[in-house]
Structures are given as C-alpha cells and as structure tokens.
Image (cartoon, rainbow, N blue to C red):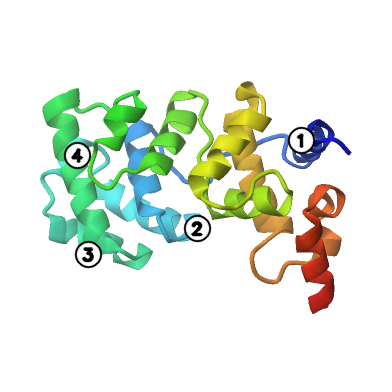
C-alpha cells in the first residue's frame, strides 16, 4: 500500500463511520465555543458540557463575563480543572474582545493567539468550527493515531499538524479532525485499546506499534 493509498483508506473508512460530525462541545456562537474550548484543556468534552450551561447562564457574552470577578468564574468552572488559569484567561480575553474587537471573536489565527490562555490548538478549533476556515487542530487522539497509522513520527504536536495538512486535502481538514477524534475515542483509545476492533491500524498501522501490541497480548 502506498502512502497515498493509506491516506485514501483512512479518509474512506472515516467517512463511512462518521458521515456526520457534530461538534462535541455545546455552544451557540463563536464566543461560547471559544470559552468551551479553553475550558476543555486537560479535561473532557462531556465534563465541560455539564459546566458551561452554569457559566453561560450568568454570562454568555464578553460584556456580561467581565461583570463577574475572576473568583466567581473560577468557582463555577472548578470541576473542569486548571480553574485558576482558565478563569483568568476567560476574564482577560473577554476584556480584550471588548477593548480591541468590539466584543466579537476575531476571525484570525494571530488575533486569537494573542488572547490570554488561547494557544494554537484552541485558535485552530475556533477557526475551523466557528468560522469554517480550514485548520487541523491536533489533540491527543489525533497525535496518537497519526503515529499509530505511520502518517507522522510522533515527535511533536506541531509536526503531526504539519504532516496532517500535507497528507490530507485542505477541504477535508475541518471534518477529518473531528472524524479522527471520534474514531480514536471509539476504536483506538490510549488505554484498553483492542487492535482487533481497530480496522484502520490493522490495515495501515506502523509495524512497530502492531508488533508491540502483539507482544503484550
């Protein structure tokens, strides 16, 4: 199988399994998505989705958010973890959106990444999912699977993103990154992984990964 054949197999398999790709984080506009993505760092989407309604009930826009204190925000979002950093980020970025962007989320990687607590991955998710601008946000699932599938060397998240963008057609990036996340959760998790359920790794997987798996059985 050539690299191009492997890539096509991945695309076709994911499209069959996940023709629809709902965004896992509940939101109603770019601002609430930005806040939800920021909150999801080192947490789970399911947990974030239980906490965002409590926060958005009090403030679902930057103007209401800055009326809350950092401590009030922190108290609400505590269950998602890293609440000291995240609450400062939410309050700080809301203030900047009002001061610099008329209360709107900017449609620009640079402007997003200048906001407190917003890194490249968060900016990529917002650009892809709120504004439909091609991006390939790499989370732990994508990083793990691109290595397992021998499509990236696993050296860094930045390298995985570069490889994904090089290998997959740009018009598929926004959907594919969600499809890979869904696949990773369902068929190719980090823990409790069963190769026999994982058709993509069986078919295109890195030999050393498959050998290691078989040794441990």
Q: In the figure, is residue 49 to the left or right of 192?
A: left
Proximity of marks 4 and 1: CB atoms separated by less than 8 Å? no
Proximity of marks 3 and 1: CB atoms separated by less than 8 Å? no
Residue that label 4 marks = 94
Foreground label between 1 and 2: 1
Q: Secondary structure at mark 1?
A: helix
Residue 53 percent location from the top left of the image: 36, 51
Residue that label 1 marks = 7
The residue depicted at 57 percent of the width and 44 percent of the height is: 160
Residue that label 2 marks = 46
Foreground label between 4 and 1: 1
Q: In the figure, 214 relative to 66: above or below?
A: below
Residue 23 percent location from the top left of the image: 54, 40
* Dot 1 or dot 2, earlier in sequence: 1
Camera sees residue 127:
yes
Q: Secondary structure at mark 3?
A: helix
Q: Secondary structure at mark 4?
A: helix
Residue 186 percent location from the top left of the image: 70, 57
The residue depicted at 42 percent of the width and 60 percent of the height is: 42
Q: Residues within 10 Å of mark 1 (few under 14, many from 20)?
A: some
Foreground label between 3 and 4: 4
Residue 190 percent location from the top left of the image: 64, 65
Residue that label 3 marks = 75
Task: Quadrant for residue 87, please give it.
Answer: bottom left
Proximity of marks 1 and 2: CB atoms separated by less than 8 Å? no
Q: In the figure, 82 relative to 53: above or below?
A: below
Label at residue 49: none
């Amino acid at each position: 199988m050539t690299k191009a054949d492997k890539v096509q197999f991945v695309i076709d398999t994911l499209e069959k399994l996940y023709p629809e790709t709902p965004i896992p984080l509940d939101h109603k506009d770019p601002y609430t998505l930005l806040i939800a993505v920021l909150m999801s760092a080192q947490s789970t989407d399911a947990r974030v989705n239980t906490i965002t309604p409590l926060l958005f009930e009090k403030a679902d826009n930057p103007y209401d958010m800055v009326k809350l204190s950092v401590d009030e925000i922190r108290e609400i979002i505590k269950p998602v973890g890293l609440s000291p950093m995240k609450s400062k980020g939410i309050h700080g970025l809301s203030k900047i959106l009002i001061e610099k962007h008329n209360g709107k989320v900017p449609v620009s990687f640079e402007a997003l990444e200048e906001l407190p607590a917003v890194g490249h991955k968060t900016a990529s998710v917002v650009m892809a999912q709120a504004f439909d601008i091609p991006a390939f946000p790499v989370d732990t699932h994508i990083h793990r699977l691109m290595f397992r599938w021998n499509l990236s060397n696993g050296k860094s998240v930045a390298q995985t993103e570069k490889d994904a963008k090089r290998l997959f057609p740009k018009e598929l990036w926004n959907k594919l990154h969600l499809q890979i996340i869904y696949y990773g959760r369902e068929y190719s998790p980090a823990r409790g992984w069963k190769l026999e359920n994982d058709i993509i790794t069986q078919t295109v997987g890195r030999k050393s990964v498959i050998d290691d798996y078989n040794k441990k059985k």
